[in-house]
Image (cartoon, helix red, strand yellow):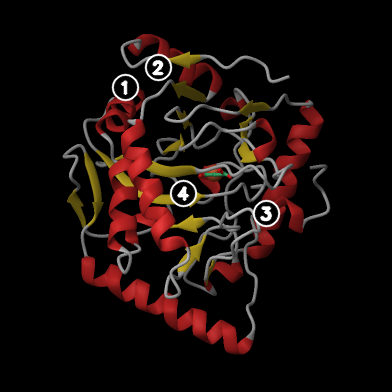
Amino acid sequence: MTASITKFAMNDVTGIKDYYESYGYVVLQTLLDRAKIDYFIKQYEKIKRNKFFIYYSQSLHAPLRPKITPEGFIEESMERVQDLKFSPGFSQAALKCLIDRQISDVLGILSGSSSHTLWQNMFFDKSTGTVEHQDHYYLDTDPPGNLIGVWYALENIHPDSGCFFVIPSSHKAQVISRENTSLKKGGLKALVPDHDEMRKKIINLIREKNCEYKTFPLDKGDVLFWHPYTIHGAYQNKNPQFSRKSFTAHFYPSHLPRLFAKTPLLKPSANPKILIRSNDLRVYGWNAKQYAIYLFNKLRGQEITMDMRRKSYEDYAE
Ligand SMILES: O=C(O)CCC(=O)C(=O)O
Ligand SMILES: [Fe+2]
């Protein structure tokens, strides 16, 4: 049995803010228009079996061709969905959901800022069983603590699909930061030992304090917002019949700089309260590079860098 989930409506401004501050997350009920979701899913079904479709995988940090399960779902999650410009119907439908007006209204309630920048985003068809972590380790603002994570349920999420979870109020406990702050020296690979340390510290913290996990089998259109210090992750899929269609995105108040990262050129999106990356040429270049890396990896064999999937490690029970 899943414990009940407190869900808020948009007009409960004080309730939303207070809950987020106490627990480090908050759920808004049917925030995202279902017709918008249906349109995105239609676009997704179109590209899924396209022979030329390549995407950057968030779970493996490498470009991939979709690996489709016997039940018809893409196995590994996609990163930078709105930047997949060689599939414009798909990427634009994703962006429409990500930058919805209701989303920016809630971001405004939580941060008090009138403009937010969309930094990173992902699409999951199935759960990849994300290890416990704080987003602060990967993405945050300077000063830290102002990033907001957003998880969008794109279907009714089954409890056995590998639900997203958070450790309530963990944003008030310890923050584990990156020791290696320079991504330039050696890229992602240089961060691997440090990342593994972080993963272990988080697991130890949870075990020492015997923390309670809160699991989210949300309904289609529900949206969860969380703090960059809140420990969260996702369970492994328990039944291959269940997908877990969802987006996640990370926003921050536009006036703040990024921690450990340069801010790219930005422009207003179709929602004037949300800024997105403006240099389209660079984004096309990034896409071309993914094709090149994909072909290179195919010839040479793929090297796994930062693996986010709990099944790749021995220290997780499920
Ligand atoms: O949905 C998941 O599996 C995890 C997503 C996540 O950790 C994030 O978006 O920050
Ligand atoms: Fe995360």
Q: Is residue 214 visible to the viewer in this orientation of the structure?
A: yes
How far apart, in angstroms, are the residues tagged by discs 1 and 3?
33 Å
How far apart, in angstroms, are the residues tagged by discs 4 and 2?
22 Å
How far apart, in angstroms, are the residues tagged by discs 4 and 3?
19 Å
Kind of residue at badge 1:
Ile
- Read off the residue under disc 2: 17
The answer to whether mark 1 and mark 2 are in CB contact below 8 A is: yes
Quadrant holding ligand 2? top right
As drawn, 230 above or below 55? above
| Image point (72%, 51%), residue name | 310
Kind of residue at badge 4:
Leu
The answer to whether mark 4 and mark 3 are in CB contact below 8 A is: no
Kind of residue at badge 3:
Arg
Horizontal and vertical percent for residue 28?
A: 42, 22
Q: Earlier in the sequence, mark 4 or mark 2?
A: 2
Q: Is 70 placed left or right of 188 in the picture?
A: right
- Read off the residue under disc 1: 109
Give the number of the mark in front: 2 or 3.
3
Residue 309 shows which numbered tag? Answer: 3
What element does badge 4 sit on? loop
Horizontal and vertical percent for residue 234?
A: 64, 41
Residue 139 shows which numbered tag? Answer: 4
As drawn, 178 above or below 166? below
Kind of residue at badge 2:
Lys
